[in-house]
């Protein structure tokens, strides 16, 4: 029988894009899939663009400190759970899949109180607070990494499945950027929100005298105007072999253009790098739970797929020099690409869809 599935999660591409990959797989099997999230964040734009019915959910982020702040949060959470119960009833939800981010908590908890089957997926080594909470009530907990099990307390079934990737990432067209033919391309991307440190490295690379590679720079929307102004201020203006975009909805195109990727180390980003076989220089974000991005990145480094540079004490000159060396070593890039491909796990979204339907056959 057909399900009405609610995807619940918010914030970054690391939550949203794996959710949509799983949602697409479920829709391909004839199920009605809807998205509950924060209307002001990435999912509020991307999910409707992908044809998903979207509901903006009231939720609050858990305060890290302060007893009174936490008590106030608990009271608000009860109200948000009550509101989510009403939405789940109105939509006739029969299955809820949480993917991380504070918005998922009211929806998963509401489903639990209503007896609606719940499952969660955690992309990173160290789970966020919402997944730690919701794992306690979910019937199925799906992980990208085995190491995540030690961070969770759950009575439900726990399985390591990998990180879902949209198959369209394998079908990119890098020619659309008009980058010069015959030159290697460095793709610079700081995630869906952008990252100041990543942008600073790109600027340092662009200003390097005698640079022999082209740059495709996805700045993040909030940084775009600032970064363009800085490129324009370079001697000679914006280099002819540089393309700057605020964001790219079709990451497959950007990855297809790239010979090396400079980026953060979110799990979904790394899964895409492995799927398309792209070498990378990774600067893990230090502003994440339990420094999980560095743990993610070290796995790729151990396989020879990436070089890891920690942000603390980062030397822009040294990093730009390392990138120049990498970009001039075609054989080394080929070895790194092979290392990335060795870690790829294809078909995770389809496997998850089949798993969900086997565990929860229908209403």
Image (cartoon, rainbow, N blue to C red):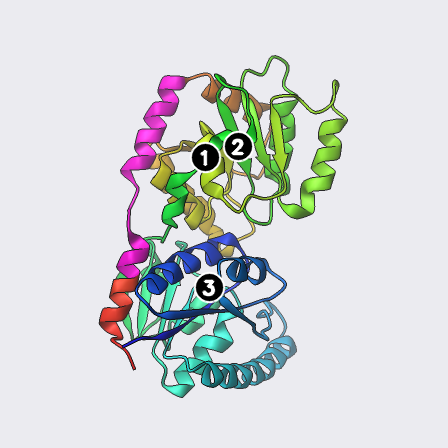
Q: Are circles 3 and 2 on residues that touch, CB within 8 Å?
A: no
How many angstroms separate mark 1 from mark 2 (CA)?
7 Å
Locate residue 161: give its quadrant.
Answer: bottom left
Q: Earlier in the sequence, mark 3 or mark 2?
A: 3
Label 3 vs label 2, nearer the camera: 2
Up-down relation of residue 21 to residue 307 (above or below): below
Badge 3: few (under 14), some or many (20 or more) residues near its Cα, within 10 Å?
A: many
Secondary structure category for the residue under label 2:
helix
Q: Is residue 282 visible?
A: no
Q: Which residue is mark 3?
A: 100
Does dot 1 land on a helix, a strand or a loop? loop
Q: Which quadrant, please, contains the C terminus?
A: bottom left
Question: What residue is shown at x 46% (from left), y 44% (from top)?
Answer: 265
For mark 2, what is the residue? 176
Q: Is residue 15 at all visible to an observer of this figure?
A: yes
Residue 12 to residue 357: above or below: above
For residue 233, above or below residue 130: above
Residue 313's mark? none
Magenta residues, start to end: 330-352
Residue 100 coordinates in the image, percent (x, y): 46, 64
- The residue at the point 25 percent across, 65 percent down is 355
Tell me if 38 is positioned left or right of 138 in this view.
right
Residue pointed to by mark 1: 173
**Image quadrant where one finds the N terminus:** bottom left
């Amino acid at each position: 029988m057909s399900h009405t599935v609610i995807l619940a999660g918010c914030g970054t591409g690391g939550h949203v894009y794996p959710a949509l990959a799983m949602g697409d797989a479920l829709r391909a099997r004839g199920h009605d899939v809807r998205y509950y999230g924060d209307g002001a964040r990435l999912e509020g734009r991307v999910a409707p663009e992908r044809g998903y019915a979207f509901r903006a959910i009231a939720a609050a982020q858990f305060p890290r400190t302060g007893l009174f702040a936490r008590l106030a949060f608990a009271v608000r959470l009860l109200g948000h759970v009550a509101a989510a119960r009403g939405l789940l009833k109105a939509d006739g939800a029969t299955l809820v899949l949480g993917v991380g981010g504070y918005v998922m908590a009211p929806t998963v908890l509401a489903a639990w109180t209503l007896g609606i089957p719940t499952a969660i997926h955690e992309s990173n080594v160290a789970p966020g607070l919402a997944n730690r909470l919701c794992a306690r009530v979910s019937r199925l907990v799906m992980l990208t990494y085995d190491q995540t099990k030690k961070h969770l307390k759950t009575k439900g079934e726990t399985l390591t499945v990998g990180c879902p990737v949209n198959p369209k990432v394998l079908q990119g067209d890098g020619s659309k950027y008009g980058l010069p033919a015959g030159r290697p391309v460095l793709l610079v991307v700081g995630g869906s929100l952008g990252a100041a440190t990543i942008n600073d490295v790109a600027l340092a690379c662009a200003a390097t005298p005698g640079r022999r590679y082209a740059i495709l720079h996805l700045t993040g929307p909030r940084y775009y105007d600032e970064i363009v102004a800085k490129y324009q201020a370079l001697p000679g203006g914006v280099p002819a072999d540089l393309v700057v975009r605020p964001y790219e909805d079709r990451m497959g195109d950007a990855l297809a253009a790239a010979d090396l990727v400079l980026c953060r180390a979110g799990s979904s980003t790394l899964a895409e790098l492995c799927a398309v076989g792209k070498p990378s220089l990774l600067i893990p974000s230090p502003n994440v739970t339990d420094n999980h991005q560095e743990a993610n990145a070290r796995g790729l480094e151990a396989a020879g797929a990436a070089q890891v540079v920690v942000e603390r004490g980062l030397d822009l000159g040294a990093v730009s020099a390392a990138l120049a060396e990498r970009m001039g070593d075609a054989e080394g890039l080929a070895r790194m690409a092979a290392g990335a491909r060795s870690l790829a796990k294809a078909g995770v979204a389809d496997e998850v869809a089949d798993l969900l339907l086997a565990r929860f056959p229908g209403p």
